[in-house]
Image (spheres, rainbow, N blue to C red):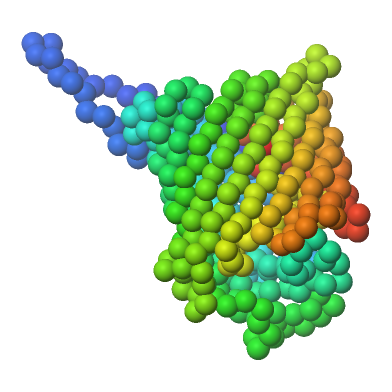
Amino acid sequence: MKLYLVLLFTLCSGGLAFSAEVDASEEVKPEEPSILERIIGDDGLVNTNTHDLSLAPVVGSTPTTGLILGGGIFLTPKEEKDYEINTVLVFSLEGFYFINFQYDNWITPRVAWGIETSTTNFIDAFYGEGNETEVDDKVEISQNKVTALPKVTYEWSDELSTSVFFDVRSRQELGARRAEDENEDFDSDLRFFEDETTTGIGISGSYDLRDNPKDPRTGEFYELSATTLPAAMSTLDESEDSLLIQGEFRIFRPVLEKSVLAFRIIGGHAWGDPSYVFRFSLGGRNTLRGYHANRFRGNKFYLLQYELRFPIWKYISGIGFLEYGDIADTALDDPKTAGGGGLRIGLPPSGAVKMRFDFGIGEDQTGLFVSFGQVF
């Protein structure tokens, strides 16, 4: 989806002070404030003593959805191991919307829990399965989609952690139309996939040696995850048990004084027959930038990503990227290449949250992608 940013504005609220009266004759242990009390005080302002508040409104347009409005709200901790809240809302005057909410918090110094959930009715582009799909194969599918990913993480050390999670994905198909008929209404009788709600149960382990997880300059990151999809936890009439394994490795090295060379290799394999919402895909704002989202699909894939990140001015930096990978149900024998460049704009007050603009070029598609945070 092409999204053109024409407005960027950041607002940071003022600080908040607390006071308490204690009887000096006896020792009183203060009560732990609730999350809501820690976020918003008596004066109704966000506590910016411990957190940074950043807002990034966005205005844009696409041919199929018309004018788009929205933005992101990010409440990020100034110190590690504190709560973090991120919300992104995008909607169009044609009635399309996308909402994403993410919350993470530490229960103890070693245990954290969080949830990421989203809902959308934006058009889903489907080109077919495998690595040989063509641009003209595109079908636009009207849908309602909801996802939820609750997880609990245990930190064995500062570098090593393990997470267990549920991965819930629900999708309702409302109709479809061919790409050449984009000005026509969706045909409710033209359907490609069965409505479903499917839940996966997973475990992941990571080993993190990065100096800064949000914007690293040096270090490595390793992660391996396994997700089981029991047939009994799907609403599909015909479903079978499936297993997804995915692993990745990232490395970051400072070069040219203030620049960073970043590399990621990621891959996955599925056993069984995962449903539509759980099959791997390449294309879009995070993988094979230059191809549109959901362009290539399959039950196994690999992807190599290279980025050169360099400063431009204050909170503004640039990147050049090159990506190479393949996806299929059978042999991985037709790799794709995409490349391009982009900008990163750090949102005040700290610049820790970044707005991302990438323009990618594939072999037969191009894409302009707007999002938040680094790709990896």
Q: Residue reaching furthest bottom?
A: 189
Q: Position of residue 365 (x, y in %)?
A: 87, 58
Say if residue 37 shows up in the picture.
no
Q: Is residue 263 above or below residue 120?
A: above
Q: Is residue 94 above or below residue 349?
A: below
Q: Position of residue 279 (x, y in %)?
A: 63, 61
User: Which quadrant of the structure image shows residue 309?
Assistant: top right
Q: Position of residue 105 (x, y in %)?
A: 41, 36
Give the quadrant of the N terminus: bottom right
Q: Is residue 149 left or right of residue 70?
A: left
Q: Position of residue 282 (x, y in %)?
A: 73, 54
Q: Is residue 101 above or below residue 238?
A: above
Residue at the location (86% across, 42% down)?
Answer: 340
Q: Is residue 168 left or right of residue 367?
A: left
Q: Nearer the viewer, residue 266 or 316?
A: 266
Q: Residue reaching furthest right?
A: 363
Residue at the location (8% across, 11% down)?
Answer: 25
Residue at the location (82% across, 72% down)?
Answer: 137
Q: Is residue 348 left or right of residue 130?
A: left
Residue at the location (49% across, 79% down)?
Answer: 237
Give the quadrant of the C terminus: top right
Q: Is residue 319 left or right of residue 84?
A: right
